[in-house]
Image (cartoon, coloured by chain):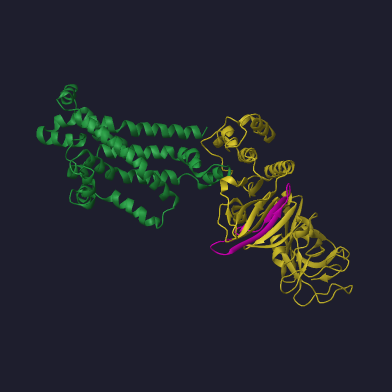
Chain colours: A yellow, B green
Amino acid sequence: MLDADVEVDRRDFRVHAAVSVAAGERLALFGPSGAGKTTILEAIAGLVPLRRGRVTLNGRVLTATQAPQTAIPPWQRRVGLLRQDPGLFPHLSVRANLGYAPTADRGAKLTELAGLLGIGGLLAAMPARLSGGQAHRVALGRLLLADCDTLLLDEPYSGLDAALRRSLTDLVVRLVTERGLPAILVAHELPDAQAFADRLAVLDHGVMLQMGTPHEVVLHPISRRVAELVGYLGFVPVPGGDAVGRNSGQEGTVAGIHPDRVVAGAHPGRGMVLATTLAAHRPSGAGWAADLKIGETAVTCHLPDNPAQHDGELLVTALDPPRFGPDGTAQPANTDGTGIRGMECG
Amino acid sequence: MIWIALLGPVIALLTHLSGGAIESALTAPGALGPLLVSVESGGLTLAVLLLVCTPLSWMLARGTLPFPQVWEAGVLASLLLPPLVIGLLLVFLVGPYTPVGELIGHLHLSATNTFLALVIAEVYESAPYYVLGAQAAFGGVDPRLEQQAGLLGDRPGRVFRRVTLPLAAPGLAMSLAIAWARAMGAFGAVVIIAYHPFGIPMQIFTTLQETGLPTALPFALVLLVVALPLPLAAYIWSARAGRRRRG
């Protein structure tokens, strides 16, 4: 179990986060670049001084700024940190890198783990000869052989292609679960965070804005800022009343439109119907990306079918869009638990 | 062409030497004494640089010293001072009537015209080359690798031994080799505070003055033969270390 309540002063702002990660649980810290995500990992690893806070790992106090003050040095923490640069020692072979930790089992366990990670044939190779994926596997194996009590992953796979990222994420998830390690991933790409985490924490400018399951955070952001961070690209005004006599919003209320949660056609039972003008469209993945204009608001959405047939005018339905008041906070959902339904806008 | 031009002095030396001249110069009574003095003082100079300047270089590279620009400016200033000026200033620093000189005197030593003076002059002439080179070598080691080694359970001393030193070693070796070459050829400061005992540069200078160029040239060859192997070996070793890392 990893518990961290840390406050760290950075040059531009103060980072504050309180997280608790159970054995085998995976938490993703998600937010834009420079939000302070890495600082939190470094605080847990003992690499940056805390202004205030306390970090415990499996009941062992690693850092405490209040009496009795404690500051266990990094080399005694048993905290594994994996960064985007795998940080292999270039003068040591793969085998020596894997067995680097003073406590590492350099015999059968090393060979077995190398086989499990798919790097069994590379033990004599030097790091410069490895591909990005292989280097990351070695770095992961090195942490596992060091018998770390927790894994901290700082955007480890950012530079790798999508397929490799997915396979490495699956591997880490499996190993973390098998070994019962609490793990924290820092990510600025939402799909990476979703693929990894049981829980997602959204961080911005040093402040933790929301924490919940990835599904919950994406579908029910608690503020407009969280919605923007998790991918809501457009915010359309909610009219004062609606067609079915509910969902009326106060002046200045907006609904968040997520590009992945828009379907063509009017489906009042599923969400908010929007009368839009098609400004542009282009192939995207297996479907189409459509740039829509809703009054003065521009929204991009993904549609399965080519929207060109609609001849400029296009009715779409934003599925259960969250709505936000003038102060940016989320407005309560309908009494039936849904978002805005039936309303027509545009 | 530039390469040949740079090697021109060495080529000129080799073409103007005869076997007989080398033999007679080196077999003259006391001819090998300066060689021994130079090698001993050079070896001691390297030891001083390793012990004193290596930690300084590391601290400069890691920026752990307060006001790092001031420290770096100090090293650069000593690099930019002409050796002859260093010699003159050393008289005011370690001469017999200075506080440092008196302190040395209490130890029944002297820093004027002694072996100690020769070592001091060589240290001053070669130290900036070593410090700046070693600083660059340590600076080339990614601090995140050191951090990673620490997180894997290594204490700082062990990190230095297992990661920092091996990664900086090629650069350190080159810096040390350059410092060795500077120490062996030190003359400007030496001629002011350590005219005696003769090292090879002083031997060349006095031979040139007393008996002329032909008899001085063999000692120049000796100086090259003694000063160059270490830099060459360091270069070859560094290149091999680089190839090994590239797999």
The spot of residue B32 in percent (x, y) is 20, 27
Range of magenta residues: A8-36
Q: Is residue A46 left or right of residue A316?
A: left
Q: Is residue B238 above or below residue B60?
A: above
Q: Quadrant of residue A262?
A: bottom right
Image coordinates of residue A180 in percent, x first then y, are 73, 44
Q: Number of callouts in the render?
A: 0
For the C terminus of chain A, give its image quadrant: bottom right
Which residue is found at the position 56% from the left and 45% from the top?
A75
User: In the depicted view, which residue is nearer to us: B60 or B112?
Assistant: B112
Tell which of A89 and B156 is nearer to you: B156
Residue B59 position within the rendered picture, expressed as x and y whole percent measured from the top left: 42, 49
* B201 sits left or right of A31 in the view: left
Residue lying at the far left in this picture: please name it: B210
Q: Residue at x 11, y 33 (%)?
A: B212
Of A326 and A26, which appears nearest the observer? A26
Of B167 and A78, nearer the camera is A78
Q: Position of residue A144 (x, y in %)?
A: 65, 40
Q: Does the stretch in magenta take in A293?
A: no
Question: Where is A251 relative to A52, above or below?
Answer: below
User: Can the viewer see residue B12 in this picture?
Assistant: no
In the image, taking residue B181 as reference, residue A242 lies left or right, namely right
In the rendered image, the vertical position of residue A230 relative to residue B202, given as above or below: below
Magenta span has A11?
yes
Q: Is residue A82 left or right of residue B30?
A: right
Can residue A215 be seen from the camera position used here? yes
